[in-house]
Image (cartoon, grey):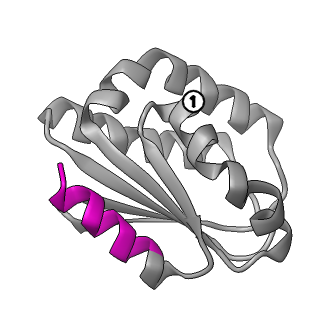
Amino acid sequence: MKIEQMSDKLIKYEVGTSVTVDHMRELVKILEEKLKQQQTFGIIIIRNGDHQKNPEATKWFNGWLKKNKPLLKQYCVGVAMATNSDRLLKLYKPLAGMIISKMLGCSGEMFTNESDAITWMLGKMRNR
């Protein structure tokens, strides 16, 4: 897992083959910093290949999302996910926008490459 501040308004989160509660805490720390700034931001998620689900990390992160969804809805302009996993694309691409909106309260889209995800996100940021 790697988290990078691409700019003051853009977070890039690269998911590895496994996600732990500590990984989620690291992401949440950055998200909370962004929310405290009360300025808009976007999230790029890169998922190369499939990864193992971690129910404990998912439960912990979903609890945080539930508490913070109103703020995320206000300040997060969108989430763009890029993956090279055919399985993930088949399963989630048609529903990505709806799932992201329901979980985070912002728009979302899934892409086959990072470049398209960044282009989409920059467009969302310009229009907000």
User: Relative to residue 74, is residue 87 depicted above or below?
Assistant: below
Q: Is residue 19 visible?
A: no
* Residue 72 found in image quarter: top left
Query: Which x, y percent locates residue 115?
Result: 43, 84
Query: Which x, y percent locates residue 52?
Result: 84, 57
Q: Residue at x 45, y 53 (%)?
A: 79
Residue type pointed to by label 1 = Lys
User: Relative to residue 117, is residue 57 depicted above or below?
Assistant: above
* Residue 90 found in image quarter: bottom right
User: Relative to residue 1, is residue 104 depicted above or below?
Assistant: above
How many residues crowd around disc 1 within 10 Å: few (fewer than 14), some, or many (20 or more)?
few
Query: Which x, y percent locates residue 6?
Result: 27, 70
Which segment is the magenta one?
117-128
Is residue 101 shown in magenta? Answer: no
Query: Which x, y percent locates residue 73?
Result: 35, 29
Tag 1 residue: 102
Of the 4 image quadrants, the one containing the N terminus is bottom right
Q: Is residue 2 visible?
A: yes
- 49 lies left or right of 67: right
Please tell me which residue lies in front, 123 or 103: 123
* Residue 127 found in image quarter: bottom left
Query: Circle 1 — which element?
Result: helix
Q: Residue at x 59, y 20 (%)?
A: 63
- 48 lies left or right of 72: right
